[in-house]
Image (cartoon, rainbow, N blue to C red):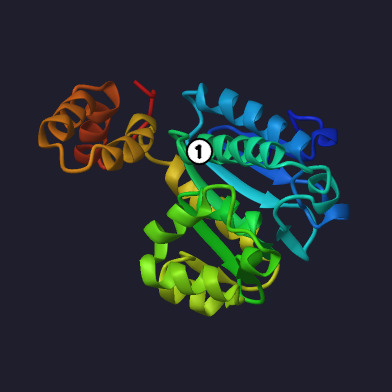
Amino acid sequence: MTAAAPTVDGAAGFRLERDEAVASLVVDREHAGNAIDRATGRALDDALRRLSDDPSLLALVVTSAGTRFFCTGGDLKDYRALDTGAAARETSLLMQRMLSRLEDLPAITIAAINGTALGGGLELALACDLRVIEEQVQLSLPQARLGVVPGWGGAERLVRTVGRSRAVRIMATAASITAEEAERTGLADLVVAPGEASAAAHRLAGEISANAPLAVRGVKEALALGDDVQAQAALFARLWETRDHREAERAYFERRAPVWEGR
């Protein structure tokens, strides 16, 4: 990346780096298995809120520091302080809000899973649009062994990703999932060699950001519209009238690459 200066202090538990239309969010709590405590959750929620208001952002890569853990979910040292059901509920709502903000970003989000993803770590990956995983990595939702269920909104996202029966098996058995199985079931979109997840995710982000900005940011909007034919037609018409669409037409007939304006 050419503009790799972090814009969020690493003391918050993560780094946010930017290279033109692509950003990287790096969970940086390697000392704690890249687990996310409540303070980091609040800081992430605020950072994602600001990113959602940035019309120039087209892709976000979510990854972590080190090579052993992508994210091990909630920080157990911090979570030991949750001594009441009310405190646990508030923490669940915080993390659900943060991951919903990630899921709802207009930019395309890509999880670069470069190490083990446990519990909330897998829930974090599920909140991304795409998942790139290294071949040695294993995933799991082990909450059933801890006497709870996924608390960050991952259950519903897992159903949408792999189907209900597979989701039941994954959560009820708490078994580990290999990268090969993750790709076969749709839990992962791409499996790469060890150490290659971040580079592969950034290549994918580069392919995405090379396209018309308004169209890229319209992808998730189109998906959210479902089968509403009138709304789909309105979105198509809105983009048809943009300067970038006209530029794409000219570039096609002139046999050159288009120059996007984002309008």
**In this rendering, position of residue 70 left or right of residue 58:** right
- 93 relative to 183, above or below: above
Query: How far across and how far down the image is residue 49, in percent?
Result: 57, 26
**In this rendering, position of residue 19 left or right of residue 251:** right
For label 1, the residue is 100
- 248 relative to 78, above or below: above
Front residue of this view, candidates 109 and 43: 43
Give the quarter of the image for residue 45.
top right
Give the quarter of the image for residue 179.
bottom right
Residue drawn where x is 42% and y is 67% of the image? 186
Residue drawn where x is 40% and y is 60% of the image? 159
Dividing the image into 4 quarters, which one contains the N terminus? top right
Any part of residue 4 in sight:
no
Q: Residues within 10 Å of mark 1 (few under 14, many from 20)?
A: some
Query: How far across and how far down the image is residue 146, in percent?
Result: 70, 64
Query: How far across and how far down the image is residue 258, in percent?
Result: 34, 35
Element class at badge 1: helix
Any part of residue 167 in sight:
yes
Dividing the image into 4 quarters, which one contains the C terminus? top left
Amino acid type indicated by mark 1: Ser
